Amino acid sequence: MIITFSLFLTCRNIVSADESLFLNISSSWNPSFDPLFRALTELGSFAFWFVIVFVLWIFGKRTLATYLLVAILIHIAIGGSVKYIIDRPRPFEVFPDAFALYNPTDPSFPSGHTEGTFAAAAVLGLRSKKLLAPLSLLAVFVGFSRLYIGVHFPLDVISGAVFGVLIGAFAAGLDVSKLQSRMESGWNRIVDAVRGKPKKEA
């Protein structure tokens, strides 16, 4: 799948269509929407999903928290690696006059925010069906926000969505019970240390 999408970038017709679609979306930019789309795009960040892992854990949804953590870690490993292997320039590097809300320094392909959000939507949605629809909708909005604020091409976002769904589906099928047990053990030690409880004798 990764190889297939990367091959698209070697086809001039596909790249040209991708760039043209980006420019059409960029031409619709309206500064009054900047705060909304900046907020939406931050919902796809690593920091946001790590916070969600912590919130789920605190509120007793520890299996979901563990699955989400696994999916996000896989996403970071795969997405980060592919970015630097493909090394596609960002839209503002190709079209200096095009609007970009800010200028990320890492490569463009695939969209990490989109991949991470779709991975989260897939793994949480597959483990808890009621979360699938709202999180999928969130993922679509995050993906579009990456286009609208000028930091990704459409193919970056589409590939990020596909990779994210595959990562989330893979993570959802794993047995995370041992990892969850270790996390709970570590968490309990932290809680005991904060409360000042003495360590149990071995």
Image (cartoon, rainbow, N blue to C red):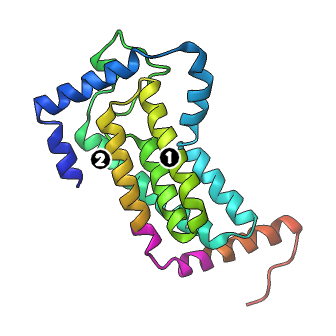
Placement of the N terminus among the 4 image quadrants: bottom left
Whether residue 120 is situated above or below residue 154 in the rendered picture:
below
- Coordinates of residue 10 in the picture (x, y in percent): 12, 36
Q: Position of residue 191 (x, y in %)?
A: 80, 68
Q: Tag 2's secondary structure?
A: helix
Horizontal and vertical percent position of residue 175: 48, 79
Q: Can you tell which of label 2 and label 1 is closer to the viewer? A: 1
Q: Give the x, y percent position of residue 164.
A: 40, 54
The quarter of the picture where residue 112 lies is top left
Residue closer to the observer: 18 or 134? 134
Q: What range is drawn magenta here?
A: 170-181
Q: Residue at x 51, y 52 (%)?
A: 136
Residue 202 as seen in the image, left or right of residue 169: right
User: Outermost residue toward the top?
Assistant: 97
For the residue pair 125 and 10, the one nearer the viewer reads as 125
Question: For the point 21% across and 27% down, which residue is it?
Answer: 17
Kindly indicate the quadrant of the structure image that contains residue 94: top left
Q: What residue sits right under mark 2 in the picture?
A: 82
Q: Please name the residue that numbered disc 1 is placed on.
A: 139
Residue lying furthest bottom: 202
Secondary structure type for disc 1:
helix
